[in-house]
Image (cartoon, rainbow, N blue to C red):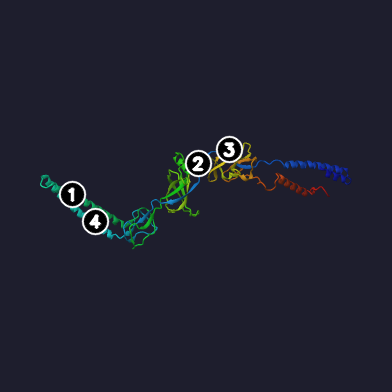
Amino acid sequence: MDIPMIRMLANRAPQWGLIGVVTLLLAACGGGDESQQQSQGGGSQQPPRKVAVMKVQPHDLELDMEYPAMIRSDLSADIVARVSGVLEEKHYQPGEMVEKGQTLFTIEPPPYQATVDQREADLQSARADLEEAQRNWARYKRLYSRGAISQQQRDTALNTLQTAQASVAQAKASLESARIDLDYTTVKAPVDGMVSLNEVNVGNFVAENTELATVTPLNPLEVRFSLPQEDAFALRRQRQMEDAPEVTARLRFPYANQQDTTANTLTGQIDFLGSRVDESTSTVQGRAIFQNPDYLYLPGQFVRIGLENLKRFNVLSVPNEAVTEGLKGPQLYVLNDDNVIQSRFVSLGEQAGEQTIITEGLKAGERIVAGSIGSVSVGEKIDPQPWQGGSQQPTDPSGQPLRSEKEPNQGTGNTGVTEQRESDQSQQATQRGNGAEPEDNDGGGE
C-alpha cells in the first residue's frame, strides 16, 4: 500500500472510527497481494507457436522446363514449272490436302508430245543405219580374212559401225529427254500436305522455274529449339541412363480456349540433340517430332516447347515460400535441436513448380520452416508441426488448421496486456451485476 493512500485513510479516521480504518488497511493490503499475483500471472511466457516445418531429404525432382521454339516442316516443297508453256488447267482447290503424286497443274502438252514423236522417228532412223553398218562390217570382215580387201577398207567399215551405234544411243537419250519434258507438263505433288494458293492463273504463259504453288506437310511436324548447355548435358545424361524415365516433348496450342474440349496439346519425341555448343549463345540445338492430326500447328509458328520427365537426381529442395531474401542474399529459417529458429544463407538452383533446388548451405536431414514465414523471427522457439505441402497450413489431429498466433505489430505491443484488459473488464461487469461499485482508480473522492 502506498504512502498517499495511508495518509488519506489517516485523515478520514475520525469519521470512520478505528475499526473501519483497520478493516480498510487489511483490505488494501490483501488487494495489493492479489493484484501482484494477477500481474505475475498475466506476464507469464506464452507457449511456443505452432509452425509448419519440413525435414529436407535428397530426392529426385521433376523439372518443368520450357524453351522457345519454331515449328518447321522439312518436307515442305515449292511447286515450280519444269517446262515453259501456257498453264492450261489447275486440278485442286487452295487449302486442300493433297497426296503425293496427285496432279496439280497441266502445262500445254502438245508441243512436247510433238517433240517426243520426232525423237522416236530419229531413233528409228538411227537403228536402221546401225543395222546397215552391222551387215557391212560382217561382209568386210570376211573379205579381209581372205585378202580380198585392204585393211583400210576394213577399218572404215568398223568405224561406220561404231558411229551408227553411237547415233542410236544419242537418239535414245534425246527421246528420253523429250518424254521427261512431256511428263513435266503434268505438275504433280511431290509430298503429302496442304497446297497453297496458286501463284499463276490458268491461261498465263509460265517460264521454266516459275513458282506455281507450295505443298506443306502438316503431319508430322518438326520443332527445333535451343537448350542451355547445362540442361542439354543433363538431358543427354538422363537419356543414357537405363532406369531413367524417357523424356518427352510437349506442345500446347497457344490460342486455344482453355474451356474448349478439343485436345490442344501434342506429345512428341526428341529425336535429335546437338553434338556441339553454340559459342555465341552457349546453347545446344534439339529437335522433336510431333504428330499433328488436327492441323492445329503450322510451320513457321513460334511456340514454347516443354520437356516432361526431365529430372534432377538426388537433390535437396524446399518450398518456394520458405526462401526469403536477406541482406546477403537468399536465406532459410533452419531449426536447431532446441526448435529455435536460425537464419541460414543458401545458394539457389533451378525451380520446379513450387520447389526450389538448394545447391549450397543446406544438409540432408536438417529441418526448415516451410510455412508462416512472415510470422516468425530468428531466435524464436517454436512448436514444429508437419508440413502438409504446397501452401497448406499445419493441421491438428482432427484435421482442422491450427490457429496461428497474431502477427507482429497487431493488437498491443506487450505480451499479455490485451488478455489482462479483457479479464479486468469482465470482472468489472460482474461487480456491476452484483450491485457493487467498481473501485475508483485515482483513489480520491467519494
Q: Which residue is drawn at 31% across and 56% down?
A: 184
Judge depth for marks 3 and 1 and give the one in front. 1
Task: Give the position of the N terminus as an image quadrant.
Answer: top right
Residue 422 vertical placement versus 338 (above, below):
below
Q: Earlier in the sequence, mark 3 or mark 1?
A: 1
Q: Can the viewer see residue 309? A: no
Q: Which residue corresponds to the image point at 25% horizontal and 54% vertical from the top-left?
A: 174
Position in image of residue 413 (x %, y %):
70, 46
Viewer-closest of 40 and 125: 125
Give the number of the mark in front: 4 or 2.
Answer: 4
Mark 4 and mark 2: Cα distance apart in space: 70 Å
Measure the alpha-carbon separation of dots 4 and 1. 24 Å
Q: Disc 2 to disc 1, how far (Cα)?
A: 79 Å
Q: Which of marks 4 and 3 is nearer the N terminus?
A: 4
Q: Is mark 2 on a helix, strand or loop?
A: strand
Mark 2 crowd level (few <14, some 14–19, many ≥20, 10 Å Cα): some
The residue under label 1 is which amino acid type? Asn
Name the residue beneath numbered marker 1.
159
**Mark number displayed over residue 312:** 2
Nearer-N-terminus badge (4/2): 4
Q: Name the residue under label 3.
A: 366
